[in-house]
């Protein structure tokens, strides 16, 4: 009796938080199909603008970069101030655009750079924005927003 490698595919179910794992295991002339429920993390749907504002506005966003830790403070009026490990103190602005992506513009000495991406809640206080993993700390922990 020959046993071959199972072919595994996933198929989304009714809610964003569940899926069915379908594994077809061919054994000889017959195949056995298994349907297994899979619980997915809450990070499979982009966060809504109101949720993003509840988490990040008036708090410190923390990102681990290759050169060190970066901090950003997002104000309710759309202004952002940051501390970058290579570039020092930065100023800019942020918004959630009409497509639901969170856009952040930082003004560097060489010019402004804008990045836009959806934000996903990964759980345990971790978030994904584009290819970056973020966390947050309550309030302005680095005293970035010197009003």
Image (spheres, grey):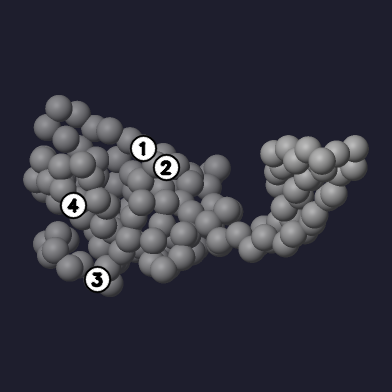
Residue 128: where, in percent of width, then height?
42, 51
Residue 102 appears anywhere in the view: yes
Q: Give the foreground label among 2 and 3.
A: 2
Residue that mark 4 sits on: 69
Q: Residue at x 28, y 58 (%)?
A: 61
How far apart are the alpha carbons under marks 2 and 4? 17 Å
Asked whether the beta carbons under mark 4 and mark 1 sit within 8 Å of each other, the answer is no
Residue that mark 3 sits on: 139
Q: Earlier in the sequence, mark 1 or mark 3?
A: 1
In-image side of 68 versus 103 (left or right): left
Q: Give the foreground label among 4 and 1.
A: 4
Secondary structure beneath dot 4 equals strand
Q: Earlier in the sequence, mark 2 or mark 3?
A: 2
Q: Earlier in the sequence, mark 3 or mark 4?
A: 4
Residue that mark 1 sits on: 115
Q: Residue at x 28, y 33 (%)?
A: 113
Asked whether the beta carbons under mark 2 and mark 3 sit within 8 Å of each other, the answer is no
Determine crowd level at label 3: few under 14, some 14-19, many 20+ residues with C-alpha closer than 10 A: some
Asked whether the beta carbons under mark 1 and mark 3 sit within 8 Å of each other, the answer is no
Secondary structure beneath dot 2 equals loop
In-image side of 120 versus 64 (left or right): right
Residue 130 marker: 2
Determine crowd level at label 1: few under 14, some 14-19, many 20+ residues with C-alpha closer than 10 A: few
Q: Earlier in the sequence, mark 1 or mark 2?
A: 1
Residue 77: where, in percent of width, then height?
32, 57
Q: Quadrant of the N terminus?
A: top right
Vertical placement of 24 versus 73: above or below? above
Instruction: Kindly give the residue lying farthest to the top in the view shown.
Output: 110
């Amino acid at each position: 009796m020959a046993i071959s490698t199972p072919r595994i595919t996933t198929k989304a179910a009714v809610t964003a938080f569940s899926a069915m794992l379908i594994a077809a295991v061919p054994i000889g002339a017959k195949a056995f199909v298994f349907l297994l429920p899979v619980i997915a993390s809450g990070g499979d749907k982009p966060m809504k603008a109101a949720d993003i504002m509840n988490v990040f506005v008036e708090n410190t966003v923390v990102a681990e970069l290759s050169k060190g830790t970066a901090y950003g403070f997002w104000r309710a009026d759309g202004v952002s101030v940051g501390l970058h490990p290579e570039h020092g103190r930065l100023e800019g602005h942020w918004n959630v655009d009409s497509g639901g992506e969170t856009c952040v513009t930082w003004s560097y000495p060489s010019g402004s750079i804008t990045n836009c991406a959806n934000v996903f809640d990964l759980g345990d206080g971790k978030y994904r924005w584009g290819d970056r993993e973020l966390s947050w700390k309550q309030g302005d922990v680095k005293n970035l927003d010197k009003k």
